[in-house]
Image (spheres, grey):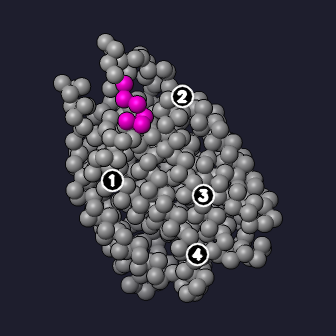
Amino acid sequence: MLPPLRHRLSLTTVLVCGGLVVTLAMGIRHGFGFWQLPITQERGWSRETFAFALAVQNLLWGASQPFAGMLADRYGAFRVLALAVLCYAGGLVLMALAPNVPLFDLGAGVLIGVACSGTTYSLVYGVIGRTAAPAKRSQALGICAAAGSFGQFAMVPLSQWLIHHLGWQEALFGLAACALLMLPLGLGLREPKAEAPAGGAAVQSPLAAAREAFATPAFRWLMAGYFVCGFQVVFIGVHLPAYLRDKAMDPQVAVWALALIGLFNIFGTWTAGQLGARLPNKFLLSGIYVLRALIIAGWLALPLTAASTYVFAAAMGFLWLATVPLTSGVIATVFGVRYLGMLSGFVFFSHQVGSFLGVWLGGWLYDRRGNYDVVWAITIALGVFAGLVNLPIRERPMARLAAGAA
């Protein structure tokens, strides 16, 4: 149940500040693929070495996300975000200065991974879910997801420009300065303390909420689908520039491809939020995963050109983060918004396990086979699998929520 209106934040303030935080947090990390070749060539490392650090980043992002969400649900989003921003900036600096692999893994993997859990969707979505009225929740989540997409569109060209004009190390310093801008923006996410339920009604504990969720089939299906989402988008986001370079494509094709993914993702996530308020979210999720598989298969089957790559990027971009507002919307509908940050974090952990495997497996198989063919085949098969596992989800509030509403 939402607290009284006088105790809520302004939804506009939350969307503006939360959207800008997600824009910076997601925009910075979306361009990490551009650092793969400069860093590995200068340091003499393999692609697997670079990919492993980003795989650790994604895994720790997911592993720490439930705890970040739980702390934000209890103590407020701003405190968690402030600490995460410092880790983000520190990780970027260490990523630039690390002379050896363990320190690089610490900066690019551990620090930035933990930082992402306190600066991205699950944390911001928890605030939005408690601020927006139920009828507007799906649209609000879609607007925030679109902000993250804009970050990719805006920050990816900036990252490439910084590398080209300043060098890869100085470019990372510049991104660290950008990360610190999230601190003042986080002030707009400070929530007033919610009132205790009237009449001494029992409040569900975080442990009880987690047990309830994991005992519910809908939650487990969401986790399975989100695993596939993570595998697909992070593999493509990190390895697409190197894949296109291997095919003798102009480096600018990769820049514009990733930018197009971000641009069309703005429209895709906004559209998903709008449709999620009108149609069953499980059907939308299933359709997104199947369409991804078809788009990837079609692009690989056609002759590789700059034009075909741009069409592929635009189509994938429209579906890129469209799963995010829909997945969070299902969680809010079924389990309520009290622990939305924590429960979204658990689902997101599954996403990041997929991300870990997608980015690491891409590098590992490339070093052993000299190409990405097997990983592309896996992304297609997983898309079909995710399309099927979302169909059994039941989008009905838990019995305790229905009883409370009555």
- The type of residue carrying mark 4 is Gly
List the residue tagged with mark 4.
363
Q: Residue at x 68, y 45 (%)?
A: 87
Q: Secondary structure at mark 2?
A: helix
- The type of residue carrying mark 3 is Gln
On the picture, is 142 further left or further right than 277?
Answer: right
Residue 207 is one of the magenta-drawn residues: yes
In front: mark 1 or mark 3?
1
Percent position of residue 213, x then y:
34, 43
Q: Residue at x 78, y 72 (%)?
A: 43
Q: Looking at the image, is mark 2 or mark 1 earlier in the sequence?
A: 2
In front: mark 1 or mark 4?
1
The one of 199 and 143 positioned closer to us in this rendering: 199
- The type of residue carrying mark 1 is Arg
Percent position of residue 293, x then y:
35, 72
Q: Secondary structure at mark 4?
A: helix
Q: Residue 220's mark?
A: 1
- Residue stretch rendered in magenta on the structure: 203-208
Count of marks, rendered view: 4
List the residue tagged with mark 2.
75
Q: Is residue 377 visible?
A: yes
In the image, is residue 164 above or below residue 176?
below
Q: Looking at the image, is mark 2 or mark 3 earlier in the sequence?
A: 3
In the image, is residue 105 above or below residue 74?
below
On the picture, is 119 further left or further right than 127?
Answer: right
Cα–Cα gap, marks 2 and 1: 27 Å
Q: Residue 57's mark?
A: 3
Q: Looking at the image, is mark 1 or mark 3 earlier in the sequence?
A: 3
